[in-house]
Amino acid sequence: MNHSAASVSVYSWGRGDFGQLGLGDESDRSFPSLVQSLADKDILHVAAGDFHTAFLTGDGELYTTGNNECGQLGAKSRELQLLPIRVAALDTYTISHVACGQKHTVAVTDTGALASWGAAEFGQVGHKEAAGSVDSVQPRIVKGTRELQFVRVACGAAHTVALTGSGDVYTFGQGAFGALGHGSKDDIDSPKLVETLWGLGIVQVACGENHSAALSADGQVFTWGRGKYGQLGHGTVESEFHPVAVTALSDQMIVQVVCGGDHTMALNSEGELFAWGRNLWGQTGTGPEEDTHRPAQVKFLESERIVQVSAGARHSVALTDNGNIFGWGDGEQGQLGEIKSSKERFPILLSGPENAGKLLYVVAGGEHTLAVYEHPLSQGQRSDGLNVHGEGLRRLKLLPIMQILEGLKGAGTSPREVLHLTQAMEHIFASVKFLIFTFKQCHEEEVCTKGKGGGGGTEGPGLDTGLIRDAYQGILELYNAEVVKRIGAAIMRLLDTMEKHMDRVPESRWLRVIPIILQSPLIGEKQVGESVSTRLFSVVARLSPSALKKLTEWLRTYSKDIFGGRFVRGVQKYITHKLHVWGGKGKIPVQVISPLKVLSLLHDANVMENLIPYSDFYSYAISESINFQEQYVKWLEYDFPKSKPLISYCQVPYVLTPDAKSKILQAEANIQKQHYVQTSVLDQLFKNQFSIPFLVLTVRRSELIRDTLQQLASYNVQELKKPLKVVFDGEAGIDEGGVTKEFFQLLVRDLFNVSFGMFTYIEESRTLWFNRNSMESANEFRLVGIVLGLAIHNGVILDVHFPLTVYKKVMGKEMQLDDLKDVQPQLFRGLQQLLDFDGDVEGTFCLTFQVEYEFFGEIKTHDLIPGGSNIPVTKDNRKRYVDLYVHYLLEESIDKQFSSFKEGFMQVCLGRALSLFRYEELELLICGLPHFDFDALERVTVYQGGYTKNSRIIIWFWELVRAMPLEEKKQLLFFSTGNDRAPIGGLACLKFIIQKNGDDTNRLPTAQTCFNILLLPEYSGKAKLENRLKVAIQNSTGFGLQ
């Protein structure tokens, strides 16, 4: 916006002996006098020191007047100036803010740099090379702050406080009384961060003679420095060397804080004024001349709504919403206008100039006062007048982020406004407090409600995730790569400062930043996104246990689309990209360790809330690239807990696919097998003891279960882990895997046959369950467990129809009502209905703590608690009834059978690798996948004996397969491989071979199931191939090695 056209008038009064009034003479004034030389200037901001004054125009030009003994006016000469002069040395800069100390001046440029000049004895101008010198400094940029974006500055007698756009405070100059806030009295000759205020989001700073104050975005006041007169407001006269919150104002929403020489004032959002500190001249406005050590309301102004205040060395002024000026304190030099006494203990209404227009803002200097009025003719013509004029006296205004984005999208936005809006957004993303404040759900005047995207409520971080989503989307829709780059750079600065301060600053101050940034669409992307992701993951990896716990609790409250679509997917993309660059072989790349820890955090949250499928955590990039045996051995050798470094992917099993886990399990089995084989060979060589390196079972088909049970009972646990070899009594054939497959197939068919009596078939769930009335011994159930364990150990898939509940029990999980759903769905629904019922439970359901079951056709009863038949189920005790009933059905009633089964299973599979699996994955390991992708099988099939994928008969074969119904496909799979289920990882993981078996013939196709080889003659036509193939697969029984 162009501010060159003058729209305001500046008036001054009070002490003028150094020309600080800018009126052209050295006289005092007891009434407001027009600063005529500024009549054609649009003065946006005025700063007043003890004896000099600075004026800032809308075009960014700076004018100064008054005392110049130390060069504080920025002029080449040391002469005082009675009229405002332009600071020509700054002509190449656009100035956005300025402050005056006792003998120095500091300005802020629109690019965020500090320019300073004047006395440098204590380092107050921030130029290291000039510190301690009695010579004055000409205006120049303060070095060493290029990466900082300053927006406001305040000056004390000989110290300076500068505020960045991201809410950080830097101080330099005289350290007497602790006015710099660094914990000592030492002088500082260049800007240094006030660590105590980091992360609080400071929006305004102020300086007294030797004390300082800061205001946070949430309206809290902090003070430090000299406290002799109670000017810090802490109830004492002690000095403070670090910023300390003014607790007496903790229940107030403060919107402005100002410092006088030795007093301080704060204005709240209701327009009420509080003051404290030295009161010898009545400058606090609280009445008696005693100093005030705690904030006290200026009662005399209770009936007024104050909109802006300012404090001089010993007087104070306030502007009301109806345009009146009130003043109080020292008035001896005319700074309060024409008054009868030399000081006023209570606020009095000051007379203003006639027909001056609307009062915009008022400023108190050392012993003089200035006011800026809007021209009467321009009133109503400027919609932004109050927002621009006097803005430097108000706290930083955080623009709503969607308003910033709308401005950036606007076609009529000027380049300068685009710059300012982009900077405003950068300031938000570079500040812990501003970022949280921008996206928090509840502001002071709002009612707290759950955000559109989750992440809210009392358990969540209290963030408006819907607004966060819209903001990120709005940034992307600007289609401006430079803006995205600058926002990314701002986030990087934020994360950098977080890493520096997170160990010293309470986590409550900064922890919410992590989910805000984690929701960014930049996470997992390349270029800027990669840098942001890397730094974010590094920060998360350094979190304390308490912070990790809190963050996990927050993450579980997010909606599924954000949790899975943003959080998990972003981390997975990053890991995939890094593995493509660094590879997955060998040790875990250091670039992947931090994101894996973040994924671990997300997994813990998902376990609590079950937001997304566990399979979303699988990393195919990891699972398809690692050396399984190497990972297992590392894991075995170094059993680190979660808090220790990651050395094996087995420490984070949820990233491994079931296929990868099964290969690790096989690696474990192979290591054990190799050990027993080697032991057998060594025993034979050195001990002259012959030991068979295999677990050999010789069984009769007619007595399969009995023979298997007797032989397995004779082997110890170690022998069960040897490689299995099966011999069918009286049959020729070397077991290369095919005989073992058939053995398991036949054994499982018999063991799980309902007529055998060990298991019952539940029609509604189409699953097998342990027969509580079984007459079989514990050994038979132990045998079933051993069989399943041997199948896993030897890489054989079984046709077993257990519900998931069984595998959950095997993994030691506690049974709950939901687990009944997989066993008896109808009973589950009935019990759930009982729990949900709002009416008369006892009268409607007529239940007691006794249940019935069938025992060989006879109905028997079981009391869930002693005397259960006489205890009715009521609304109060129904939860206990359901828990006891579920425990009885899934635990107690089959305890003997299941315990034996599990004992047998664990005899074979008690290795560590089993712990990698979820119970759902354990089912896949034993039974394979229930779906079939024959297109994938076609892609991996190998052809031998003269066939290729382009052979005519091969093309016919796959056309016929694609046309087969599911059951026929399963028959083909069984005929060719000895099993009708897909292996873990799908049919793409099956090593399937089609081999030529002669020319055209009437012979049927045959198979070598131990090698998954289909032997296919080269039939003369497609119809003949179809006929021969279907006859073969429909009549395949027994096993014969071809």
Image (cartoon, rainbow, N blue to C red):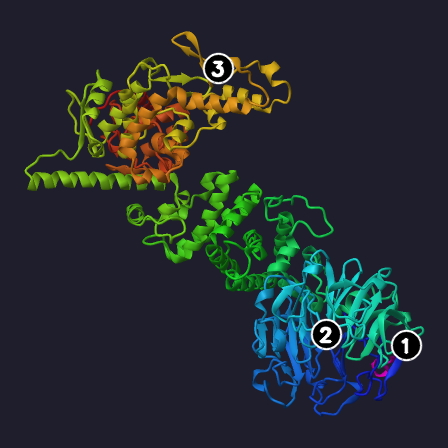
Answer yes or no: is residue 260 visible: yes
Image position, residue 517 (x, y; %): 56, 55
The numbered disc on residue 657 is none
Query: Which quadrant of the rendered structure holds the C terminus?
Result: top left
Q: CB of mark 2 within 8 Å of CB of mark 3? A: no
Q: From the viewer's perspective, is residue 309 above or below residue 57?
A: above
Q: Amino acid at mark 3?
A: Gly
330 and 774: which one is in front?
330
Residue drawn at point x = 30 percent, y = 28 percent: 903
Q: From the viewer's perspective, is residue 818 above or below residue 292?
A: above
Residue drawn at point x = 32 percent, y = 32 percent: 953
Q: Is residue 327 left or right of residue 869?
A: right
Would you say residue 1039 sits in the magenta stretch?
Answer: no
Question: For numbered disc 1, what is the local secondary structure?
Answer: loop
Q: Which residue is mark 3?
A: 867
Residues rendered magenta in the picture:
33-38
Residue drawn at point x = 70 percent, y = 85 percent: 72
117 and 86: which one is in front?
117
Q: Which residue is mark 1?
A: 339
Residue most toward the left? Answer: 688
